[in-house]
Amino acid sequence: MGRSWRNFFRRGKEEEAQPPVATEEREAPAAGPEEEPSGGWFGRLRQGLRRSRESVVGQLNAAVAEFRDADDEEFWERVEEILIASDVGVPTTAKLVQQLEQEALERNITGAGELRRLLIEHAARMLEGPVEIDLSHRPTVILMVGVNGTGKTTTIGKLARHLPARKVMFAAGDTFRAAAIEQLQKWGERVGAPVIARERGADAAAVAHDAVEAAKREGVDVLIVDTAGRLHTKINLMAELEKVRRVIGRQLPGAPHEVLLTVDATTGQNGLRQAKMFKDVAGVTGVVLTKLDGTAKGGIALAIADEVGLPIKLVSVGEGVEDLHPFDARQFAEALFGEL
Amino acid sequence: MFDTLSERLNTALEGVRGSGTLTEEQVKKVTREIRLALLEADVNYGVVKEFVGRVRERATGAEVSKALSPGQQVVKIVHEELANLMGGSAHKLSYASRPPTVVMLAGLNGHGKTTAAGKLALFVRKQGKNPFLVACDTYRPAAVDQLKQIGRELGVPVYDEGTEAPPEEIAERGVKAARDGGYDFVIVDTAGRQVVDTEMMEELKRVRKACRPHSVLLVLDVVTGQTAVEVAQAFQEYADFDGMILTKLDGDARGGAALSVVSVTGRPVRFASEGEKMGEFDYFYPDRMAGRILGMGDVLTLIEKAEAQMDRREAEAQSKKLMAGKLTFEDFLQQMQMIKKMGPLSGILGMLPGIGQQLKDVQIDDRMLNRVEAMITSMTPQERRNPKLLQNPSRVRRIARGSGTSPQDVQRLVRQFNEMQKMMRQMGKGGGMPRIPKMPFGMR
């Protein structure tokens, strides 16, 4: 579902050789699965997902075990059900099952294991996209957007811990929700990032403006701008977001360099609408799938990748800082459909 | 993305009108469409299966009436079944015979517990209660601050001990503090948690034991997908909740999760929480939710909202004028002000069946209403009563200057007003509702 942080950030040339700063203060990044296949975060993730895996994978196992040949209508119906139960959604499920059925027929697949591999392969292919985050700009501006309660502020805190940058700065652009500024400030203290803020109720674009100016002045490497959670249906709030984006771009041409949309993994088909609207208005460049530590299967990621064409860049599989990971399509597909 | 279920069913059942009973083949088509619609609304697939079976039974051999199209008729059956499943009428809150009434909120991270706590406090205060909040979310940074800020804004006291003490102890002392202070309604806010985190779920159990709530409410985000069932089952096991607060209903999620949870746990949705303003909170009405899940719009709510704002006789007089094509800008202004009182325009239009779908990709800007209002208030009383005067360019220029708009804007308003008059006259003559040619006043 995730991979190691190595090579996740693209950096400027002069910096390539330098080690991440202040590593000793940080928790060691969790070992990637390639080093520690049974334990580490992958193991925790599997454990975390056990409840949902028990039901979904259990059914999948049962279904696959009964698989005889690709002509079996009932079998494909069960696969469909399993995908839908993972929040993949009807259109993407139909597409995936059709692809699978066709290939299974063509290649005359009869083995259960082979079929599972095929399923994982197709899902992974659908999910593949540009994952890296480009940090070669000085400062690099990352804008966090999303609906309420999807974990924007938390993601900012976690992401900052992993940034191989000397100077990180936060902008408290959520001037709406009670105590949102304080929440970001607490993260700022934890990770040693100064927080540019105004009072609650201030214009978010003004905060963004201040922050970009401060970041330029103080030679900050990465500026992460938090924004208030907003439902994608609220036109005024979406217009405000557009303005924040515009103001950042005016202060620093080419910025924001990344616009990350947080999507709660428990989200159903409305996640598609969220992704579409935020992509249109805020120019989202990638998705952070959060709260994948619950029962959620996060199948909405497949639908978003397929129907909206946005790459998933990061996944959050727990509450700890070490639980944020660069997205790995193959592992995600395996976690969804792999054997227990 | 999706059509309304009724449109889909009508397509599936084309030509069936008035032909006696539905055949097996037709019922099969119907159940397929219902299944898809419910899945797209995020109803759990297991629940869908069961539900569709029930509808199939009722639809097979159902008389096709002459009044309704077969599609409509099946929709009616589905709607009834859905509303029944969700518990018929609203489930009101009951208060403890010996106060204080203690209500504990629980739920996943980010589903809106803290905001709901504030809204519930305001809601019960309006009912004459004296609410008191207890901050037990010691995990999320600044969660305690958030509740304290909300409490300050509402003027509701908040009990907190920072983030060091165990939540169950805070809960116990909080309830005691409320009792000692003479408050009669205590709301205990807890941390968001993932149901797979057994430690956290055990903690919830302890908090529940410590504060001995009369009611435990599961706070559930309306966007929740298929996982809602497992989430609800876990919270039932550890917190034994007796009802739900459904949050973020002002978005465009269809909210099938609500149906899943109710049908699996048997616990009703008690409250509907809409927007970010503290007042946007009310009892939950299952029949309305049924319509939302089916994409049928929320006619009942709209009717109620309109009724609350409109003087009936006034309305009748206006609609007569409207149909006769004798509407003036004065009437128009009045109607607009009434509409504005009903809430955001996007919300109102979304409640209209059919329209909600037609407008699903339309951007509706409430400021547009303000602009139109500015233009009309910049007209003289004569101009408002007699729009023909507005063919005079110098009048148009003056109105544009007065309202901060351009002469083109004013001309467009006048033109569209005239077009609307024409359309209404047609309707008044019994020409039926024409398809709206284009949205007036800058809605794109």
Image (tube, coloured by chain):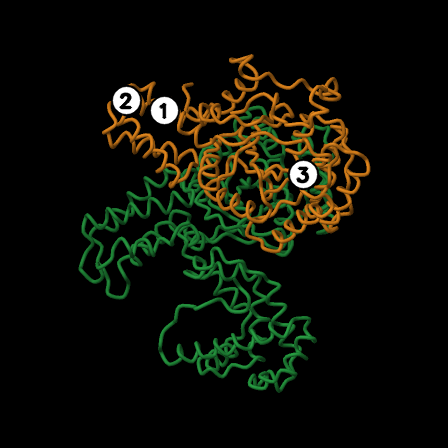
Q: CA distance from mark 1 to mark 3?
A: 56 Å
Q: What residue does disc 1 label? A: A118
Q: Which chain is orange?
A: A
- The quadrant in which residue A179 appears is top right
Other-residue count near label 3 (Cα within 10 Å), few / some / many at <14 / 14–19 / ≥20: many
Instruction: Determine if marks 1 and 3 fall on one subunit.
Output: no
**In the foreground, B227 or B357:** B357
Q: Residue B345, how many percent across, how many down?
A: 55, 62
Q: CA distance from mark 3 to mark 2?
A: 63 Å
Badge 1: chain ID: A
Q: What residue does disc 3 label? A: B175
* Image: B441 above or below A153: below
Other-residue count near label 2 (Cα within 10 Å), few / some / many at <14 / 14–19 / ≥20: some
Image quarter where the C terminus of chain A lies is top left
Q: Residue A278, how many percent across, how many down?
A: 56, 46
Q: Residue B137, how many percent across, how many down?
A: 66, 34
Q: Of callouts 2 and 1, which one flags the residue occurring earlier in the amino acid sequence? A: 2
The residue located at (59%, 44%) in the rendering is A283
Task: Name the element at disc 1.
Answer: helix
Q: Residue B187, how many percent across, how many down?
A: 63, 43
Confirm or deny contact between disc 3 and disc 2 (CB under 8 A): no
* Image: B7 above or below A52: below
Confirm or deny contact between disc 2 and disc 1 (CB under 8 A): yes
* Amino acid type shown at disc 1: Leu
For chain B, the rendered hue is green
- The quadrant in which residue B288 appears is bottom left
Q: What residue does disc 2 label? A: A109
* Amino acid type shown at disc 2: Ile
Mark 1 or 3: the one toward you? 1
Q: CA distance from mark 2 to mark 1?
A: 10 Å
Badge 2: chain ID: A
